[in-house]
Image: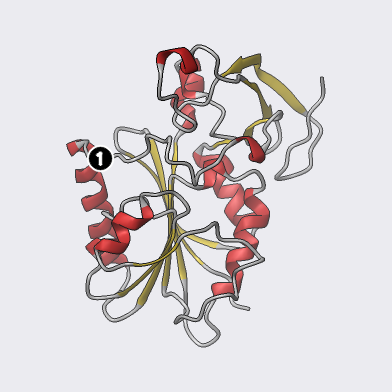
Amino acid sequence: MKATCPICNNNNCVELLPLVKQPLSRYGLSITKDASSKVHKYPIHIFICKFCEFIFNNDFDPNNVDYRSNEVQESSIFSEGIKQYMDDSVLFLKSMLDLSGESILEIGCGEGYFINSFRDSELIAYEPSPEGYMAEDLGVRVFHEYLSLDNIDKYTYKKPHLIAMRQVLEHIQDPLSFLKILKNFAKESSSSYLYIEVPNSYLSVNDSRFYDFYYEHVNYFTIASISNLMNKAGYRVISCSEEYSGEIIRVLAELPKK
């Protein structure tokens, strides 16, 4: 079977993980033991582009994952290690950008722990899952839906100085088009910035960690592939590094002016 890279349209992609079928990992969880034995299994067929090193599930269908479901286990705030990493990420951003009094938008804010750390800013978020109501209780203005071209002009708020997107881009089928959508948030007279965190798939491939590949993640990034993606989308990468013992890639980039 042949596959085409969704980032560079190169046909020189090779199979990295043969086709397997697995149930969803964290979404559509079953309430009973009997229901869990009958869950639907979805195809995972992983390819890597030999040109830009982008790794993707060629058989992914976004309609199979409902992030609005109550049957989900997503929050990571119970991990002290993850909380400490989020705190460190907040300090990193505050050291790089003057965010006081600015507007901050987080796409996929979850329960709101990260964005609520910027309390001296205007806080806005998109979160389709039920966790968004927890963020709302913290004082974040939450839109309980997916961000898309259909609703990008639906609400009125100050254009953000910073857009944060943590553990989100790996779920989006066409990340290049999505990054281009975010250009609509770029300010005309001053700079806007994008902060991204994604799992680092270098260790997954290098250490043959097959369990890191699951259906909810359609994209698998390395430093090289996400840097290429950002450049192709027209962003100026300020910082791109491996964090959390190499498990997470952290990117800070400047949004292109309109």
Spot occupied by residue 85 in the image (x, y as percentages of width and height): 24, 44
Pick the quarter of the image with the C terminus: bottom right
Disc 1 residue type (three-letter)? Ile
In what quadrant of the picture does the N terminus appear? Answer: top right
Residue at coordinates 59% horizontally, 77% vertically from top-left?
A: 257
Q: Nearer the viewer, residue 28 or 89?
A: 28
Image spot of residue 170 (x, y percent):
53, 41
How crowded is the residue under tag 1: few (<14 C-alpha within 10 Å), some, or many (20+)?
few
Residue plotted at (47% across, 83% down): 190
Q: Which residue is mark 1?
A: 82
Left/right of residue 8 with respect to residue 211 in the rendered view: right
Who is closer to the viewer here, 54 or 236? Answer: 54
Q: Is residue 8 left or right of residue 79?
A: right
Q: Is residue 7 visible?
A: yes
Q: Nearer the viewer, residue 6 or 256?
A: 6
Q: Secondary structure at mark 1?
A: helix
